[in-house]
Amino acid sequence: MSPFRFSVAAAAALLIGGVCPRSAAAGDVNGEAKPIAVKHIAPRPQDLPAPGGRLKLSLQLGNTREITQNVTALINLDGRLMNIAAGEGYLNEYDSPTFELETSSPAAEIAYQFVVRSSDGSMTSSKRYVVTRRCLPTVDLTNAVIPKEMQGNERLRTLVEATKSLERDLVYYDAALRSVSELKELLDDE
């Protein structure tokens, strides 16, 4: 996704002769800028990817059109604290600055809060979001041995279950490989 996306309204404003000042863009008639609003919809527990899979979080800012904000997320992922910077922002189809970041999906719970640092030095934070899985997924590796004495539907059912378990294992291995690659890149940079 390109970091620079413009809507028809933004393109028309540029063609007509400029962009509104921040206070007018924020909708304030007294010339004073309203505080930046952080808008985010937390994922539902049932929508979380498998543990270790990639979880994409996005947020929109209200009362501003600046995409140069420094946006970070303070994350507690299964008891591990992290500070992850969002990528460059872009204007979405409603001309709201939008920022995205990726983290690993939790095994049990993720709690996070966004912090926005503006170019003028002011800071805004979102409310704290907590997403807890309703039940812990099984992370044991699959035993794909199927007894030869099984026949018919019972054998087919067992094969389907083993296939689903192997697919889950593949997701775990992919997540682990991605994490090792990211760590290797960090170590190579130092």
Image: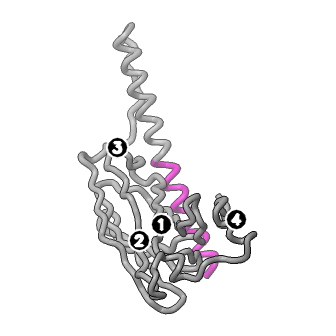
Q: Secondary structure at mark 4?
A: helix
**Which residues make up the magenta segment?**
172-190
Nearer-the-camera pick, 171 or 83: 83
Amino acid type shown at disc 4: Ala
Front residue of this view, candidates 57 and 110? 57
- State the quadrant of the C terminus: bottom right
State if disc 1 and disc 2 touch (CB < 8 Å): yes
Where is mark 4, residue-wise?
Answer: 12
**Disc 2 residue crowd, few under 14, some 14–19, many 20+, Cα 10 Å:** some
Q: Amino acid at mark 3?
A: Asp
Q: Is residue 188 left or right of residue 64?
A: right
Name which residue lies at 24% across and 46% down.
Answer: 135
> Is tag 2's residue or tag 4's residue first in the polypeptide sequence?
4
Residue at left 39%, top 36%? 142
**x, y percentage for residue 79?**
29, 67
Q: CA distance from mark 2 to mark 3?
A: 39 Å
